[in-house]
Amino acid sequence: MEQPRRVTDSFPRRRRRRGPGRPPGRLKDRKDKDQDKDKVQLKVRECPRGPSQPPPDPALMEMLRRFDLSWEYGPCSGITRLQRWERAQELGLSPPGPIRDALLEHRDNPDVTYRWVWDGMAW
């Protein structure tokens, strides 16, 4: 009986080339690592942001967090909170009205508009 084909079977096999003068399995010198870190730090730029906005009210953020975590209004990946609210309204799921009012009031604040996920926890 013939074995099933794998996705990798359709690509030619290539061997990694070793750098000149480096024995197999050896890491770069410590000096090279420090230089690599410097290069990476140079590439990192600060993202330009608009004028700083005051942080939203903690009670508002708690209300939005509860809206984010309630699955009865559908998934929230890849869309804004307002889009999720409108989709739930169209589907007849009757999302809370104060959520929509808060989202429209703080439309320019990305902390309110978008659901933030940090270290696997919703904010």
Image (cartoon, rainbow, N blue to C red):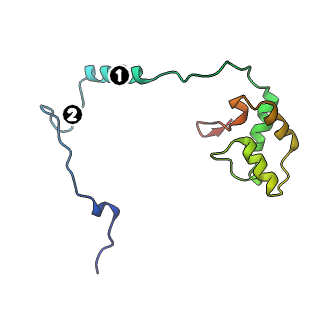
Which mark, residue 105?
Answer: none
- Chain-order first, disc 1 or disc 2: 2
Quick check: marks 1 and 2 in contact, CB under 8 Å? no
Number of numbered discs overlaid on the protein picture? 2
As rendered, which of 38 and 121 lies closer to the eye? 38
Is 61 above or below relative to 83? above
| Secondary structure category for the residue under label 1 | helix
The quadrant where residue 9 appears: bottom left
Q: Is residue 25 left or right of residue 75?
A: left
Residue under label 2: 26
In the orientation shown, which residue stands out farthest toward the right?
97
User: Marks 1/2: CA distance?
Assistant: 22 Å
Is 91 above or below relative to 98? below
In the orientation shown, which residue stands out farthest toward the left?
21
- Quadrant where the N terminus is found in the figure: bottom left
- Quadrant where the C terminus is found in the figure: top right
Front tag of 1 and 2: 1
What x and y, as percent, mark residue 6? 33, 65
What x and y, as percent, mark residue 59? 82, 30
As rendered, which of 45 and 13 lies closer to the eye? 45
What is the crowding at mark 2: few (fewer than 14 residues within 10 Å), some, or many (at least 20)?
few
What is the crowding at mark 1: few (fewer than 14 residues within 10 Å), some, or many (at least 20)?
few
What x and y, as percent, mark residue 46? 52, 21
- Disc 1 marks a residue whose amino acid type is Lys
Residue under label 1: 39
The quadrant where residue 105 appears: top right
